[in-house]
Image: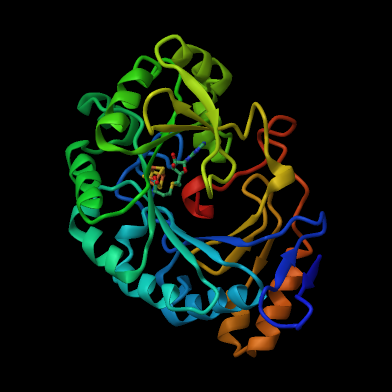
Amino acid sequence: MALKTNSSGKSAAQLLDPFGRSIDYVRLSVTDKCNLRCFYCMPEGFRNFEEPEHWLRFDEIERVIGAFAELGVSRVRLTGGEPLVRKGLPVLAARLAALSGVDDLSLSSNATLLSRHADDLKRAGISRINVSLDTLRPERFREITGGQLEPVLAGLMAAKAAGFAPIKINMLALKGLNDDEFEAMVEFCLEHDFTLRFIETMPVGSTGRNASQNYLDLGSVRRHLAKSFELVPGVMPGGGPARYVRVGGTELRIGFITPMSQHFCATCNRVRLSVDGTLYLCLGQDHKYELRSLLRQGISDAGLKDAILEALALKPERHEFLDKPGQVVRFMSMTGG
Ligand code: SAM
Ligand code: SF4
């Protein structure tokens, strides 16, 4: 692990992990709570949430993200749990967007509360939004998430009206549950000018492992879609781990995120900060580093940056979802997906 600077020794810092990967992205979980219960993410009736006194306060989050930004991180995504259930999220977003070095502040949301907050989030400086949406059928939505589809659609339209672009729809491909809706979701995204990304289910937590019975290899989804649409290989700026195609004759991009069938660990560029101030170095491993106690003991800014560098040295090479599917016991909502 190393910290590189440019020839003038200023800015353009670059955080490198032990495998030479440049880490420029933090996924920041602002809460482990959620108003939905997607069966692959959080168990029904789950209540064992982090104590409020353990949540990082906004000033603590700002310090940690500020330290990361000084070390070379330029991209931050607010996530959870459902980030919009954390009170004052637009206020936090504005504080993070104002940090020197943070060029790209984005949000992952289930969109249930987005119609209320879309304008404030846009004004706060969030540039891009990803929304989880696995089905367009209300009954099926209830079955998968325990909630109602209507507010999600309203939230998506509010985000569009507020001027967010691109808006990306994240759809888990679930055998026997939504595998007859892929074309319908493509049409929906074409109609509304959204980007569509399919995701493979991961064995994260007992919920993720139970959902393995619905696992679908995205190679099969792509072959299936190719029967109805012309899929032109393409790229998407800032597309992350997704492999993109464009639907011929349209501007619609479809991404395939394949953590299981074709993992992308060699290009991993991220770490995750959970609501209690734990840095997780990999979604699929237990390597972690606690920052909250250091913050509350009054660590200096220099000490905080040293702690982050020490944490980065723990980043493992890859997940082992296939070799050790029972390994990760925490739910996706706890780590910050
Ligand atoms: N609540 C927000 C949402 O749903 O977008 C943000 C947090 S959620 C944990 C982030 C992403 O994790 C969602 O797109 C969700 O589909 C995905 N996710 C949750 N559990 C998963 C699993 N077992 N395998 C793959 N993706 C999962
Ligand atoms: Fe909530 Fe997102 Fe997990 Fe669904 S995937 S339960 S919306 S945190």
The image shows residue 138 at horizontal and vertical percentages of 21, 28
* Nearer the observer, 311 or 103: 103
Res 172 → quadrant: top left
Q: Position of 249 compared to 224: left or right?
A: left
In terms of depth relative to the viewer, which is nearer, 179 or 219? 219
Q: Hey, which residue is sitting farthest front in the picture?
A: 249
Q: Is residue 113 visible?
A: no
From the viewer's perspective, is residue 76 above or below residue 149? below
* In the displayed structure image, the side of residue 14 where residue 329 appears, left or right: left
* Residue 12: x %, y % from top left: 67, 73
- Specify whether 268 is left or right of 121: right
Q: Position of residue 288 (x, y in %)?
A: 68, 61
Q: Quadrant of ligand 1?
A: top left
Quadrant in the picture for residue 92: bottom left
Tell me which residue sits at (70%, 85%) in the image.
303
Q: Position of residue 253 (x, y in %)?
A: 44, 33
Nearest to the observer: residue 324 or residue 2: 2
Residue most toward the top?
227
Residue 3 is left or right of residue 210, and the answer is: right
Q: Quadrant of the N terminus?
A: bottom right
Q: Quick check: can you spot residue 329?
A: yes
The answer to which quarter of the image holds residue 72 is bottom right
Tally of numbered tags:
0
Tell me which residue sits at (49%, 27%) in the image. Answer: 211
Residue 33, placed above or below residue 203: below
